[in-house]
Image: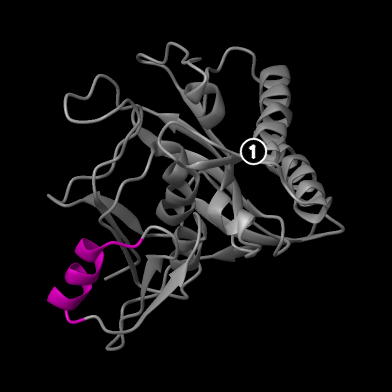
Amino acid sequence: MLDILEEAAVAAGKAIIDVYNAGPDIAYKSDCSPVTDADETAERIILDKLVAAFPDIPIVAEESVAAGHVPDIDGKTFFLVDPLDGTREFVNRHHDFTVNIALISKGEPIAGVVYAPALGIIYAADHGKAKKSVVSGLTSIGRPVVIGCRNRGDRIVALASRSHNSEETVAYLAEHGITDYESVGSSLKFCLLAEGLADIYPRLSRTMEWDTAAGDAVLRAAGGETVTMNGDPLTYGKRNQAHDADFANPFFVSRGRS
């Protein structure tokens, strides 16, 4: 399965880079978040490949959900897809945008792929192992290197969202005496934790499940964790939430080994 997820992500990433180089057409959703022709093209590519390979597994994908297409996932294993995570980074010509595909079982991300096409890097995880590969020529995936979270030392490095940082996140860092942090876009923050380049990523602003699932899968396979503010593992497939929309996440903290 992981090979097919990687192939789908890389194919979508190639289409994204084509739009990136040509200049995207930008529209705005009802929540004022941007969406581009790259998001829509990439999602079509991913859905076509997943449906062909796994016709019995439901797919929850960002743009499809926005259009009102939500499959029945009750009690089922399903895919979560964000065809272009970090659309603001993409629009603003930064390189830290990603393609995210995750497999969810019983509320847990058990496999996932995060591809950063502008950086030529792909992260993947399943069966409790996480790896990183270089993608050359936008199509060829090189030999993978196994990655893992580092043990936390005296110098704690935090990651924060470039486009969605919040006063609550800044306060959390101050409360925990963390002064060293870097701003990074998209799900790459999970992957940097997973390969031992940082220690903690507090997210005290809104996210959706497709934003986090694939990166969270990589992080968990690398020995890290993502927990809500009460210490419970972040779960996926959240529907009929009284306080928020379907598939919306609560605030959370992702971290490597303590």
From the viewer's perspective, tell me whether residue 36 is left or right of residue 187. right
Tell me residue 41's x, y (percent).
72, 33
The outermost residue toward the right is 137
Q: Which residue is mark 1?
A: 39
Front-most of residues 54 and 205: 205
* Residue under the point 44% across and 71% down: 183
Question: In the depicted view, which residue is nearer to us: 86 or 119?
Answer: 86
Residue sticking out furthest to the bottom: 154
Q: Is residue 74 visible?
A: yes
Q: Does the magenta stretch mainly form a helix, a strand or a loop?
A: helix
Figure quadrant of the N terminus: top right
Residue 86 is at least partly visible in this image:
no
Q: Position of residue 171 (x, y in %)?
A: 17, 70
Residue 117 part of the magenta segment: no
Where, by quadrant of the figure, is residue 84 drawn? top right
Q: Which quadrant holds residue 149?
A: bottom left
Query: Residue 177 appears at what percent x and percent y?
Result: 17, 82
Question: What amino acid does circle 1 point to?
Answer: Asp
Q: Position of residue 74 (x, y in %)?
A: 35, 13
**Horizontal arrangement in the rendering, residue 74 relative to residue 121 (left or right):** left
Q: Residue visible at 29% across and 52% down?
A: 205
SS for callout 1: helix
- Pick the front one: 44 or 223: 44
Colouring convention used in this rendered image of the protein: one colour
- Other residues around mark 1 within 10 Å, as few (<14) / some (14–19) / many (≥20): many
Residue 204 is left or right of residue 69, and the answer is: left
- Image quadrant for the C terminus? bottom left
The magenta stretch spans which residues? 165-177
Asked if residue 167 is among those painted magenta in the image, a careful observer would answer yes
